[in-house]
Image (cartoon, helix red, strand yellow):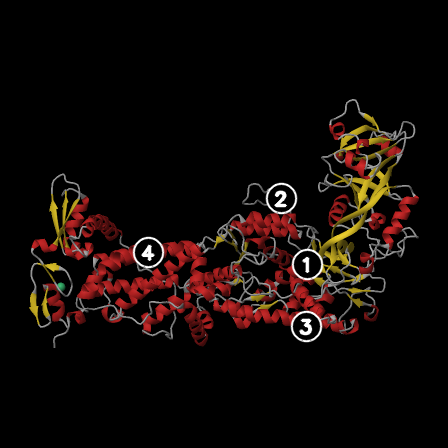
Amino acid sequence: MALELKDTLQLPKTDFPMRANLVQREPARLAHWETLGLYNRIQQKNSGTGKVFVLHDGPPFTNGDVHIGTALNKTLKDITLRYKSMRGFRTPYVPGWDCHGLPIEQKVARDLQEKKQTVTTAELRAKCDEFSESWIAKQTAQFKRLGVLADWKNEYKTKAPAFEADIMRTFAAFIEKDLVYRAKKPVYWSIPFETALAEAEIEYKDHTSIAIWVKFLVPTDEAKKFGLPTDKPLSFLIWTTTPWTIPANLAIAVNPEEEYATVRIGPAGDHHYLLFSKKLASKVLSDTKLAGPVSNPTNLPPNAIWDSRPSPLISKETQDGFHFSWVDIRLGKNLEKLVTRHPFIDRASPVVLANYVTMDSGTGCVHTAPGHGMDDYQTGLKYGLEIYCPVGADGKYLDDGRVPADLVGLTTLETVEDLEKKRTSPANIGVLKKLAATNTLLAKEKFIHSYPHCWRSKTPIIFRAVDQWFVGLDRADPSFESKGAAYSSTDKNVSTVGTWNTPRSQALREIINIAVNKGWIPAWGEARIRGAIESRPDWCVSRQRSWGVPIPAFYDANKKAYLDAGVARAIADKIEKLGTNFWYDATPEKILEGVKLPAGWPAPSALTCGRDTLDVWLDSGSSHAAVLARGQGGTQWPADLYLEGSDQHRGWFQSSLWTSVIARGHAPYKAVLTHGFIVDEDRKKISKSSSYEKPQTSDAYIGKLGADVVRLWISSQDFRDDIPISDEILGHVGETYRLFRNTFRYQISVLNDFDLARDAVPVGQMDTLDRWALNQTAALLRECTAAYETYEFHRVYQLCNQFCSVTLSATYHDILKDRLYTLAANSPLRRSSQTAIHHIFRTLVEILAPIVMFTTDEAWSFATDKIEYATGSVHLQDWPVAPAAWTNPEVDAEVAALLRVRAQVNEALEPARQAGHIGKSLDAAIILTIAPEDMAFKILEKHRDFLPELFIVSHVTLTPTANAPLSIGVRPAQELGHVRCPRCWRWVPALENTVHGDVCPRCVQALSLI
Ligand SMILES: [Zn+2]
């Protein structure tokens, strides 16, 4: 029976939809994978290979929706792991969550405060746990929606009892190596709550303080030693807005590079000397009214006089008969170690140097109390000063035998009522009286400035040094293996030489070892982490918080601390079963029940439990011990890779390195890969704290674009730099996505009647163009594999984009249409091309599977089973291999030459098309004129029969002409007297009659096989 001609064509056919509808359809595929048990099946597939790749997950904090930056991080991990598992590696991936810490405790505490609820520590911790757990559930759903494949049932949480126990065991290792010590450090302190506050619990508000100018006398012998005047009293003049800290004064800080003036004040014979900043001299004299009433500024020595270097020294007599004269000017550094006397305590106060001393207020001579300020504390450490804090937890002066008796017990607290009535604290009043009595208070005035207040009590905080636990990073540990030999770094600037017996030298050695194996990716990561490790002061590991892992320290009635590695381990064992709430619920007797106490410990009944928690960086920094060393989810220690944002050189990479070298002697990772941050078009970081209108959550982007487009966008960017996001960039990525999807769809549709086992053509018997396409595919695979190996996913994106648009769409697929549609189904040429397309499809879809994982799996289902959800999955495939036969440089060179001519032919066709001489290119006949000695001629002649198909025209004449460069003539085929075949639309000299109608001889042959 005769068929309509169009029904005799082999037209492409597939149910693979043109429209992706990712937002609607991706969730169904996720559910399908869940049913398949995809994660476990992938692990099983590779369980016998003996190859393992452990990427250890850095835990996100559990207090909000997944940010697009976190989505970037998880996607890069997912792409890496999917690639590795296709390469035959078992890739156990245990996702983690960082659960403890201030942001959660603060949020929960604020909520409780708004509801006016008071709770016990254990109740607060339970609420924090609940809060963290609720976000873990939400984040899990959001990561899954992104397509992250992980061992979700084996996740790790830093708040899980077993994990908490391992954190404590890590700390026990620190104690065991004698690295843990106790020392004072200033913190923000809330007096009403008797607790340390974190920066986030501080509110800055205006506060009326009392500013005072105080004289610190220089003893005559000191003045003499420094060549300063000795005929009359000489004093340093300091300025402070916290009079109550004067009893804790231990030094005066000056800026080493600023000039300081010694000024003679008063008429000759009745004079004295003050020493302060030359730059601030006019202001000091005015503020202290030394130069007469401020209402009469003419009393002041003009700046011009003060600022020009006087030689000889200039003096000035004011209207009040006061004399000012320079007697000495010198740089601050030339005053170092001069010793002054405390104004009312029999104690020395030496001059120290500090670069933070500025010349914008005060006197340039800074009262320094290392127990009451961070800058002062650092200077105190530098000069070996005591971190002295004579103020108790209740804000009152202690009776420490050093605070004057009349000050003991006075409080530094200013209550809310005091603030309303503008009253200053009893401690301030007491100090002012002492200063007045010793005639050292030169001046005072009210001073309004922004000052930190406790967010709960609304009272001004004080800085107060409290005992903290530190880890000594430079303490020698005899248990470390001492190599003794010098070592060299890959960085020529590093000349570190030494032995390996301190945590810091151990960490530095590990950094170098990793660098030698090219494990810092990008390479500048080595310098970044070395800087962090080298500059880190001793690690203060204690926090005065509730939501964390307790420091297992005990105290006797005299506040003496007891800390022991064996005891810590025994408590860790209990915590593993009971959780850390045990520490807060139970008595010391109960906690220490059955624990062998070290010699010298009091009975448990005489002890109380410490209330400090460990720095949360120790939590996440212990994850390698709690997860990898325990083989959780099939992982192993050390990790092959840590992969996080580049801020983690100072964060998780660092804390993990410390805990690992101290507890295990080596780094917990073989390689560390970092990525940049997501920025908008203006290169501004899109962070959680910024107020951009741009959506910031992963779900916002997925809900609009689908996870595959988001993932494709992430892969398209060189993540070693910052990663820009804009509508324009996402628009381009959307186009690329459609290109990939259309490529898959086209290939599936033309393979509709192809069965590899039945129809495949061996490579050796394939058509030239098909062999060229396979050669191109082999090259694509080679380059993409290299790019994946070096984590250059953006190159995979570019290579595949180029391959689909140029190699396939504009060239190979375009040329093939004629043979695929019009030849008989079983024609060897058609089967040859289908064989090639089959291989290209498999290769391409597998190369892109780690990135566009939903769409490649969908395409795979339709290609293998002609249904949307097959029982197999592209994600269960091994990485494609290009057989050696695909690589064929000769064919590649020949076809490349032909394609160059094709490009010229296309250029020549365009004017004919525009002029209306031809419609489609098939309407054209081409006349190629070329010199016979031209290399191209030989190739053109060799492939003469193929040329019409290659150019997609109806007829090609090849005319060798001596000395002629290639020229191309275009004529409508009709002018040659040809007729168009109604089936294949090619113009031929004559048609032949069949039952289906008149067609060209080639179509006759195709029809005869129906
Ligand atoms: Zn035909």
Query: Which amino acid type is shown beneath numbered disc 3?
Result: Ala
Work out whether mark 3 precedes mark 2 in sequence or the reverse, and give the earlier one. 3
Residue depth check, mark 3 versus mark 2: number of the one nearer the observer? 3
Res. 704 visible in picture:
yes
| Quarter holding residue 730 | bottom left
Residue 559 in the image: state x and y as whole percent. Answer: 83, 62
| Quarter holding residue 313 | top right
Mark 1 crowdedness (10 Å alpha carbons): few <14, some 14-19, many ≥20 = few
Q: Disc 1 on helix, strand or loop?
A: helix
Query: Which amino acid type is shown beneath numbered disc 2?
Result: Val
Residue 881 in the image: state x and y as whole percent. Answer: 34, 61
Residue 83 vs residue 751, the one in the foreground: 751
Q: Which residue is mark 4?
A: 803
Residue depth check, mark 3 versus mark 1: number of the one nearer the observer? 1
Residue depth check, mark 1 versus mark 2: number of the one nearer the observer? 1
Is disc 3's CB within 8 Å of ligand 1?
Answer: no
